[in-house]
Image (spheres, coloured by chain):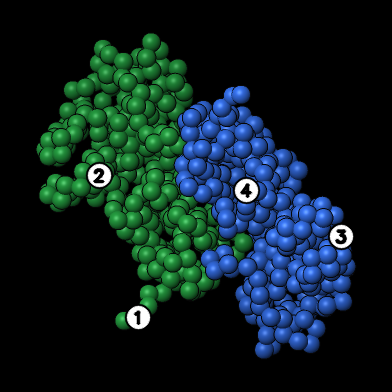
Chain colours: A blue, B green
Amino acid sequence: MNTAETIGSLGENESLKRTISRLNASEHALVGPGDDSAVISAPDGRFVVTTDTMIEGHDFRLDWSTGYDLGWKAVASNIADVAAMGAAPTALVVAVNAPASTEIHWLESFADGLRDACERLAPGCGVVGGDLAASEQIMISVAAHGSLEGREPVLRSGAQVGDIVAVAGTLGRAAAGLALLQSANRDAISAYDALVDTQRRPQPPITSGVDAAAAGATSMLDLSDGLAKDAARIAKASGVTIQIDRLQLQGFEAVLEEAARAIEASEFDWVIGGGEDHSLLATFPSDAVIPRAFKPIGVVLPVGHAPVMLGANPMPEYGWDSVRD
Amino acid sequence: MNTAETIGSLGENESLKRTISRLNASEHALVGPGDDSAVISAPDGRFVVTTDTMIEGHDFRLDWSTGYDLGWKAVASNIADVAAMGAAPTALVVAVNAPASTEIHWLESFADGLRDACERLAPGCGVVGGDLAASEQIMISVAAHGSLEGREPVLRSGAQVGDIVAVAGTLGRAAAGLALLQSANRDAISAYDALVDTQRRPQPPITSGVDAAAAGATSMLDLSDGLAKDAARIAKASGVTIQIDRLQLQGFEAVLEEAARAIEASEFDWVIGGGEDHSLLATFPSDAVIPRAFKPIGVVLPVGHAPVMLGANPMPEYGWDSVRD
């Protein structure tokens, strides 16, 4: 039996060489990986940039997610923040820190996940640079870039009274998947593996971000911390109250109901508190032609005593805190 | 006595609020921190991007470096990679992961270090986004961006036979500082505190990157892993041999000689193997007017049996490997 090759035994250069060779190229890279920096095209004279980190034990567990899953998720979660500006993702830089004992196979699978997520969710986008170093925990830090293609960025602060509130993508599926994994109920995990897959490899509606901007969206964000918490962010930034219509959430709840029953959880909590689907929440003028991927779920009201209402009642602000949880 | 406030007790939002308020704004940010992404100006239709990570226990020790030192160093080490392309740094995104028990004071000092390094080393550049999350070790991951201002990027691959090899900035000072700290020799640390300061808060010659590009540099890189290892990178990428003149290194060695003697170390090893000064190594055509910050240290020869020669002998390839060391 061969001893598995590790990133420590291969060293930084060889490990990077094997990894980089698996990646797709960014169509927007004028200078790709391998120099001190990459050079990326920014045709309209601006670029969009965001960063997000995933940490072993806090954001993922290695017995629940493969290297491939984590590569996919690192891309998906970051480019969702690009899409939420109304931009098209163009280029990523990826810093990976892992114990020297990590098998090179894990890193290669991670690279495959990066590549496939780029190709599937944001064709033309690719990894243009990175960094590999030793650490005790696996930590994955990505900076994602995008092009506004001449449009104005869609901020959190532009929601207007009378706008329609709409969501593109799923709600609560990733939270359901996490709860299933945490339940350790093998039958339930197997029965609802599609939900677990959303937790492992979310499929945010990336191209819908550009569609929303083109349709005149007045505000938008990536639902990374859950509908309740993230809707409050738009409400506070825009100085309005967002009223969610509970009836419009029923479709999101219905598909989670069985799984919730199987592990004695609440599908409603998943829908309003779960964020890792990385869906897009946006507001549109009432006369806009809302892109088909967006489902109306509420309206924008003058600022009231709560940033977000669920029907006639204040929505409790709960959701994920990355330091406390 | 008050209990110290920690990032865990304050939570993500409050911790970020206190930190962001200490930062300087990037002059190039069209949309700054606070939305899903920032929007940065890229006047010539391109931008430069690089990423680098620092990890507690591998890249720094908290008993040797303050939060301020680490903020400074995170900026300096990353914008040196931007400068090495011949670009002017414009914007940074910074991901910080730290134990929930970390005092908010540490994070505030870290932000002060980020700010001061931007203002001192690359005026106009600032932090435009970030991420804060809990981890067991402190990990700092930065992506740095720059503008080529219409110039072509200076790559590692452009060195031509007959070019002059030159370095801007110091060599070996940061390595000397590290060796002093490792020696635990308090008298020596105190006597040579300026070297220790270079290890803690390197001062790379950022503006010299643009100067080199404007003067026609044919290749350039940031000396992050030491002269021997990094010169070999230019040599291999360009298909040449770089010959370093040992006489020209004597000035760099001389200022380290006393400190080396104090802790029985080798100033020569520091000069050719030490990288954290983040100085710039470049090649210039023999008829170029080399910017004053650059000191000639060698010439470019046709490819020989070693990528780097020290006089008539092959230079051993040694230096830092981020996974193995």
- Give the amino acid type for the residue marked by disc 4 in the picture: Leu
Q: Position of residue A153 (x, y in %)?
A: 65, 60
Tag shown at residue B182? 2
Q: CA distance from mark 1 to mark 3?
A: 55 Å
Dots 2, 3 in contact, CB < 8 A: no
Let me know if marks 1 and 4 both belong to one chain.
no
Is residue B236 at all visible to an observer of this figure?
yes
Tag shown at residue A62? 4
- Give the amino acid type for the residue marked by disc 1 in the picture: Asn
Q: CA distance from mark 4 to mark 2?
A: 35 Å
| Location of mark 3 (residue) | A292
Decide: is B197 above or below A2.
below
Q: Residue at x 40, y 51 (%)?
A: B56
| Front position among marks 1 and 3 | 1
- Give the amino acid type for the residue marked by disc 2 in the picture: Gln
What's the chain of the residue with tag 1? B
A193 to the left or right of A73:
right
Is residue A37 at all visible to an observer of this figure?
no
In primary-sequence order, the first of circles 3 and 4 is 4
- Depth order, front residue of B252/A161: B252
A45 to the left or right of B294:
right
Q: Residue at x 34, y 27 (%)?
A: B318
Q: Position of residue B172 (x, y in %)?
A: 25, 36
Q: Residues within 10 Å of mark 3 (few under 14, many from 20)?
A: few
